[in-house]
Image (cartoon, rainbow, N blue to C red):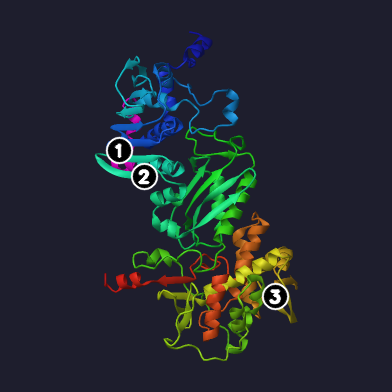
Amino acid sequence: MSAAAAESTSRPLIRRLSETTANRIAAGEVVERPAAAVKEIVENALDAGATRIAVTLEGGGVDRILVEDDGIGMDADDLALAIERHATSKLPEEATLFRIATLGFRGEALPSIGAVARLSITSRPAGGAAHRIAVEGGHVGPVTPAAGAPGTRVEVRDLFFATPARRKFLRHPRSEADHAIEAVRRLALAWPAVTFRVESDGREVLTLSATDWEGRIRQVLGPGFAAAAVPVESVGIALDLRGLAALPSFTRPTTMGQHLVVNRRPVRDPLLRVALRVAYRDLIPQGRHPAAALFLDIPPESVDVNVHPMKTELRFREGEQVRGAVISALRRALAVGAGTAVAMPSFTPASAPGAVAGFAPEPGPAPPDAQRPGFAESHALLAPPLSMPPPMQRALGLAPAAQPVASWQRERAPEQHPLGRAVAQILETYVVAEAPDGALVLVDQHAAHERLTHEALNNQLVEGGVRAQPLLLPAVVDLPAADSARLIDHAETLARLGLEIEGFGGGAVLVRALPALLGNPDPAPLLRDLAEELADLGEAASLQRRLDAAVARLACHGSVRAGRRLNAAEMDALLRSMEATPRAATCSHGRPTVLRLDAATLERMFGRR
């Protein structure tokens, strides 16, 4: 045999796959686990106008999935078409592919399920007769008359029996059931007017009655989330946003607490998750994630849902505008003072590690009394931008001459403020207050003042630049050459923050002015920390990120330190400032500034209940 002949016989030949094999391959993208099948079938029910949907699972959905709805149903002809690939009633014209207003539109779900499982569909339109069709491993049976109530009943048995290799990758039935229940829960959150019921292995695991969106949030996410969240609302020409966003004190170790709905479609869109992360960037600790339930309505032509077969990712036509609108709405909603708008979450022994993770006074010795500005002096400049009430301004104007509070003061009733009145200072770090309802309030004075300084610096920056205080004698700070060069490279950015520096030869930096809000701190530690912060960010960081990081570092160095004794007026002024300052419940690093122990919490801690 010649070499050419040998080559021709060894070359693989292109051949067309059988329809059954092709359908099973395609099904792998749509039906990756029982939860995906449940999601697709429930979405079909919602598109059919169902007001009641019941889901039954057996063996985690692998053995059996049953979805019953009271939607519009299908007649015999539609039933026969429903199990054909790329047959759908949701795209009357192909041009509507760019204006999709339904959950489904690909016409792939039912054929995909039928290709890998034993599928039967019984449907009856209003005023018509019921019919049934069965598909087993891709083999379609005839449409036959059947008995059934108005609506549709979809039953899936032996999922992946036709592709046994896929079954090996499934988890324990309980885990698969949990994923399927979560899929229904997310759809239920997006469709509050629909009643849902889920049963797993004979046990009812989810029952949600029809309600409004606020009621559905409480049903799905629990009253704890609703109590620790603030309303979010933004109405625009091309975008409406509503929902609830958890306060920074209510964080989660993963992003599972983020429920995002776009045009009544639950999504896990990267752009929206980035918007959440940016909005909470300096409010929560590193490694923690915010929780929120946000409903976004946008014209269908402004968003492309035809990105992935699972339809959980989107592509926005004006992505930056959507991202900016979400960030702005979240920041407005979170701009509440400590203790206002919503009740602070109570501190309990079980939640203590998560609630106070990383919560500690800033390390380092306090400066000598002669060089340490009092709280009243260092904080006096905060009054104008924060619109402090007159009593607080008077308190801040007092010289720190009064004796520190060293014992409980029972002669005065608590003032009618969310954080109450200060009654003592302990460990020269924490302010103890009594709330109007008698609850015990603990405030970290350094963390709280850090947030107040941070917000004041931000306000000045927005107004055109932080006010600088020239030094009578410029200070020279010696730094490693790399740190010195990094600071000089960002001198223009730092000047906007009231920090005026210039090179002084070698690794030295000459400091000519400091932000006026900081008082008179030692510039050397400040410059070292700023250089480290800029190094961590890297050169690719945006100007806004560099400004945010620098403001946080400046606020830390300009705040009252742990170990500083405060008098009664100063402590009350601190509490009033926290109530009037946006985002004052956490410091610039995301750690809590205030903890609340109510009567029930104290009773649990002492074993009284």
The residue segment tinted magenta is: 160-178
Q: Nearer the viewer, residue 267 or 560?
A: 267
Label 3 sits on a secondary structure element that is strand
> Is 297 one of the magenta-colored residues?
no
Tell me the amino acid under the disc marked 2. Leu
Q: Bin the neighbour count of mark 1 within 10 Å (Cα to Cα): few under 14, some 14-19, many 20 and up.
A: many
> Is 175 one of the magenta-colored residues?
yes
Tell me the amino acid under the disc marked 3. Leu
Question: In this picture, is 257 found above or below 144?
Answer: below
Which residue matches tag 2? 208
Quick check: can you spot residue 529? Answer: no
Residue 94 image position (x, y, % from top left): 58, 23
Q: CA distance from mark 3 to mark 2?
A: 58 Å
Q: Bin the neighbour count of mark 2 within 10 Å (Cα to Cα): few under 14, some 14-19, many 20 and up.
A: some
Question: In this picture, is 350 found above or below 68?
Answer: below
Q: Quadrant of residue 151?
A: top left
Which residue matches tag 1? 60
Q: Nearer the viewer, residue 257 or 166?
A: 257
Q: Quadrant of residue 399?
A: bottom right
